[in-house]
Image (cartoon, rainbow, N blue to C red):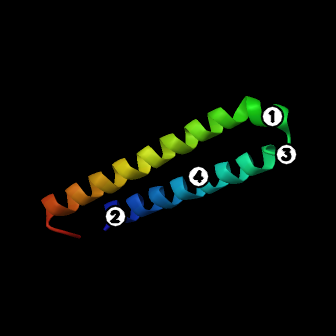
Amino acid sequence: MYVPRRVREVREALAGLRESLLALLEEIRANPVLFRRYAPAIRALIARLDTYAIEISTTLSALQKNVGGW
């Protein structure tokens, strides 16, 4: 079905973006100026992505219960 596939794609995209942000955070760690400047924003983005992932999982679970499974 279309909805579960799209949800899976969005989850995978969010996970990939999260991994990229973590890699970027590690790269800028070597430069204290960049790290101080950009690390808080990168961490905030990662936290927002984690929130979205939880919301997607919760919504998907609710849809599956209401529709009777896919």
x and y percent of residue 54 in the render?
38, 51
The answer to which of marks 4 and 3 sits earlier in the sequence is 4
Q: Residue at x 29, y 57 (%)?
A: 60
Measured in 3D between alpha carbons, the distance from the residue under mark 1 to the one under mark 3, in whole angstroms, is 8 Å
Tell me the amino acid under the disc marked 1.
Leu
Q: Are marks 2 and 1 in contact (CB under 8 Å)?
A: no
In-image side of 69 versus 1 (left or right): left
Among the 4 quarters of the image, the one containing residue 29: top right
What residue is shown with label 3? 30
In-image side of 1 versus 48 (left or right): left
Which numbered tag is attached to residue 34? 1
Tell me the amino acid under the disc marked 4.
Arg
Q: Residue at x 83, y 31 (%)?
A: 33
Q: Nearer the viewer, mark 4 or mark 2?
A: 4
Measured in 3D between alpha carbons, the distance from the residue under mark 4 to the one under mark 1, in whole angstroms, is 19 Å
Query: Depth check: 65 or 67 in front?
Result: 65
What residue is shown with label 2? 4
Which numbered tag is attached to residue 18? 4
In-image side of 40 versus 30 (left or right): left
Q: Are marks 4 and 1 in contact (CB under 8 Å)?
A: no
Q: Are marks 2 and 3 in contact (CB under 8 Å)?
A: no
Above or below residue 2? Residue 43 is: above
Q: Residue at x 52, y 53 (%)?
A: 14
Which numbered tag is attached to residue 56? none
Q: Are marks 4 and 3 in contact (CB under 8 Å)?
A: no
Tell me the amino acid under the disc marked 3.
Ala
Q: Nearer the viewer, mark 4 or mark 3?
A: 3
Q: Are marks 4 and 2 in contact (CB under 8 Å)?
A: no
